[in-house]
């Protein structure tokens, strides 16, 4: 098993979506339990990675408080893969840890499971799996995947799961940490 140190990992927090189900408000900056949602993911990963990137398309100066802000290199909110592509182009470590900004219950143990999955695997991508479905925005990706992802996006494709399945993929069982997958998509979800 190959032990991965924090110096080998860059994190990207995906905060570049339209947030149409939240009335267009910037989800990463919406308060949950008294703090902006993005702050939860940043707090959890700061001890586990060397660098935190924030993939955002608006409120860039506000997001700078949480990490190095990167913008998608594709126009018109092309989805999470556009943010991952921008992060891979900026990533100087062997691994990129991908997390969404709108899952504030993510835990350090959950992140450790993803890292351990990559350590045990010969795969290019390790993605969270709850026993039934893959949760594509929780993943570890080898940073040498940039050209593959660029080609995929250039073909007009945008589906994360489709690109993942075209690579050497390992699914990491996170069924012991299901709460970490809780996604805040609507205003009523803020009452969790």
Image (cartoon, rainbow, N blue to C red):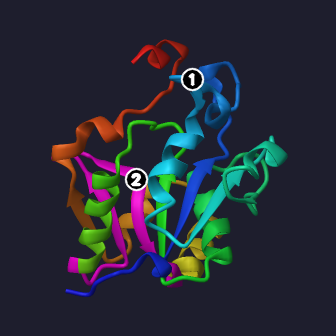
- Residue drawn at the location 30% of the way across and 74% of the way down: 118
Does the rendering let one see residue 155?
no
**Residue 129: x %, y % from top left:** 25, 52
Q: Mark 2: which secondary structure? A: strand
Residue at 38% x, 44% y is 106
Q: Quadrant of residue 171?
A: bottom left
Magenta span contains residue 138: yes
Please give the name of the residue rendered at 35% of the width and 81% of the height, measured from the top-left corner.
4
In the picture provided, is 9 more to the left or to the right than 39? left
Q: Residues within 10 Å of mark 2 (few under 14, many from 20)?
A: many
- Position in image of residue 11 (x %, y %): 53, 64
Which quadrant holds the C terminus? Answer: top left
Is 180 included in the stretch rendered in magenta? no
The location of residue 95, given as percent across then percent down, is: 46, 77
Quadrant location of the N terminus in the rendered image: bottom left
The vertical placement of 123 against 74, above or below, is below
In this rendering, the label closer to the viewer, 2 or 1: 1
Residue that carries the numbered disc 1 in the rendered image: 34
Seen from the viewer's position, the closer of residues 11 and 6 is 6
Within 10 Å of disc 1 (Cα), the crowding (few <14, some 14-19, many 20+) is: few
Provide residue 17's location: percent of width, then percent of height: 65, 41
Image position of 92 (left or right of 113)? right
Query: Sequence order check: which comes first, mark 2 or mark 1?
Result: 1
Residue 12, label in figure: none
Give the distance between the C-alpha atoms of the residues marked 2 and 1, in whole angstroms. Answer: 27 Å
Residue holding disc 2: 136
Report the residue at 67% width, 51% height from top: 66
For the residue pair 48 and 22, the one nearer the viewer reads as 48
Name the secondary structure under disc 1: loop
Q: Is residue 99 left or right of residue 131?
A: right
Residue closest to the far right: 61
Q: Which residues are magenta?
A: 120-144
């Amino acid at each position: 098993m190959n032990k991965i140190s924090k110096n080998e990992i860059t994190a990207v927090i995906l905060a570049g979506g339209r947030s149409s189900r939240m009335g267009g408000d910037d989800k990463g900056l919406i308060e949950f339990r008294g703090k902006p949602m993005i702050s939860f993911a940043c707090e959890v990963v700061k001890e586990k990675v060397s660098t935190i990137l924030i993939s955002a398309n608006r409120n860039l100066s506000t997001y700078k408080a949480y990490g190095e802000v990167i913008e998608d290199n594709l126009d018109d909110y092309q989805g999470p893969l556009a943010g991952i592509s921008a992060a891979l182009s900026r990533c100087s470590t062997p691994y990129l840890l991908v997390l969404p900004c709108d899952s504030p219950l993510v835990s350090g143990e959950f992140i450790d499971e993803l890292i351990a999955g990559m350590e045990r695997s010969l795969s290019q991508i390790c993605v969270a799996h709850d026993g039934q479905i893959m949760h594509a925005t929780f993943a570890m990706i080898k940073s040498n995947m940039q050209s593959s992802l660029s080609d995929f996006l250039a073909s007009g494709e945008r589906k994360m799961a489709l690109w993942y399945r075209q690579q050497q993929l390992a699914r990491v069982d996170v069924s012991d940490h299901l709460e970490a997958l809780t996604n805040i998509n609507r205003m009523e979800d803020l009452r969790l």
